[in-house]
Image (spheres, coloured by chain):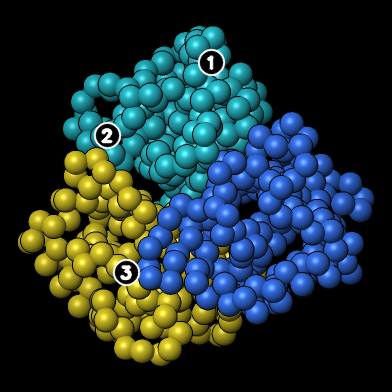
Chain colours: A yellow, B blue, C cyan
Amino acid sequence: MIAASPDVVQLNAEYARAIDDDRLEEWPDFFVEECLYTITSADNHKRGLPVGLVYADSKGMLRDRVTALRQANIYERQTYRHLVGLPAILSHGASAMRAETPFLVVRVMRDGRMDLFATGRYVDTIVDDAGALRFRERVVVCDSGRIDTLLAIPL
Amino acid sequence: MIAASPDVVQLNAEYARAIDDDRLEEWPDFFVEECLYTITSADNHKRGLPVGLVYADSKGMLRDRVTALRQANIYERQTYRHLVGLPAILSHGASAMRAETPFLVVRVMRDGRMDLFATGRYVDTIVDDAGALRFRERVVVCDSGRIDTLLAIPL
Amino acid sequence: MIAASPDVVQLNAEYARAIDDDRLEEWPDFFVEECLYTITSADNHKRGLPVGLVYADSKGMLRDRVTALRQANIYERQTYRHLVGLPAILSHGASAMRAETPFLVVRVMRDGRMDLFATGRYVDTIVDDAGALRFRERVVVCDSGRIDTLLAIPL
């Protein structure tokens, strides 16, 4: 049995909005210091295979990633639009919550072309960090294993 | 006037998640024993024309459908990703509720190709079945009449 | 900090449903008499450039637009399917509320072809108009600047 949680709905909406508004500098703040952020495919996730696409295990690595994106100016070439579904709360302990949230991301290129970029689910461990919900783990499980190699902006 | 209903939002999220997670064996349990599940197009639905695509009028038929899918191994060739919108509660009687919920389904093929598979609305009659909300009727009204003939997984 | 608002979620759901159900005559009623409805691109919006695509600054203009659409019968050639995300409430004064809501619109042509038509965000000023929430301003900011010139149905 899963239960809806307005706070987790809100967290997901703010996370998506920060990225889609190109406020990437705020993105690491959705995580606690000791965190895990990875992007993988459903197949690899199911088989327990190592993550190939993106792996970061500290907030510092997330910040470095944003800095690199800004320096490379890759971020200017595309924007994302996230649509997220209702989170399923899988477990809710005293200190942490496990949740899964479906998502769909459309990519919009600089010249106006749009494509369905990724669908999948966020598999999250969420903690209350001094009054704010933050991700201790966010595993981005993409339904397709064919992810664009230009993958640059956080999902 | 329509009103939001957290329970119906939740029901829709769990329904979509069961299918997208390939837990198809759980899918018939979203329905009561004497139920109706059909897939039709908006044009046919508006004109009251008979349903062509999928028709099942008992939970047993839904179970048979899942068994057939498993035996055919068709289910392995593709997965879905549902995004559902807010349900509109059209009427709310003592024993049943009428609701409409917009949806969008992306199909992900085994080789990683993704396409926008279907959009439309669920036209539902929902009942309280010993404490759990279940569908007495779920009419899947697809916006497009051009539905892929490989249609196999439940929408 | 943004906060979710069930009323604004509801308003967005009803707005989308009216359009997707082809009840266009109800569309102007989502606005107050003295209103602003425009469609623009994210680039133009960010730079403060004039709106090129659609501009209406009274409820009468919105009604005229619907009348024109009906006479041209253009509306028969396509339908939309909106999926909207969670509104971010940007400010909430005594008389008005500022909100932003992400959206995705799929277009379904008469012959059944579907395409991802537009993504973006609604930038709204919402007022309480004698007990009902209505838009004083709805600026439709499309992520892509490449909007189909057949743009006809309201977004």
Amino acid at dot 2: Arg
Q: Where does the C terminus of chain A fall, quadrant-wise?
A: bottom left
Q: Which mark is residue C146?
A: 2
**Element at label 2:** loop
Q: 10 Å neighbourhood of mark 2: few (<14), some, or many (≥20)?
A: some
Q: Which residue is drawn at 84% across and 46% down?
A: B92
The alpha-carbon separation of the residues under discs 2 and 3 comes to 26 Å
Amino acid at dot 3: Arg
Number of numbered tags placed on the structure image: 3
Q: Which of marks 1 and 2 is in front?
A: 1
Residue C138's place in the image compared with B61, above or below, is: above
Residue to which mark 1 is pinned: C73
Q: Which residue is drawn at 19% across and 63% down?
A: A150
The alpha-carbon separation of the residues under discs 1 and 2 comes to 24 Å
Output the chain of dot 1: C
**Element at label 3:** loop
Give the quarter of the image for residue C21.
Answer: top right
Q: Where does the N terminus of chain A fall, quadrant-wise?
A: bottom right
Q: Which residue is drawn at 38% across and 83% down?
A: A44
Output the chain of dot 3: A
Rendered location of residue C58, percent (x, y): 46, 13
Residue to which mark 3 is pinned: A146
Callout 1 touching callout 2 (CB < 8 Å): no
Rendered location of residue B17, percent (x, y): 59, 68
From the viewer's side, name the closer residue of B114 and A59: B114
Residue C32's place in the image compared with A80, above or below, is: above
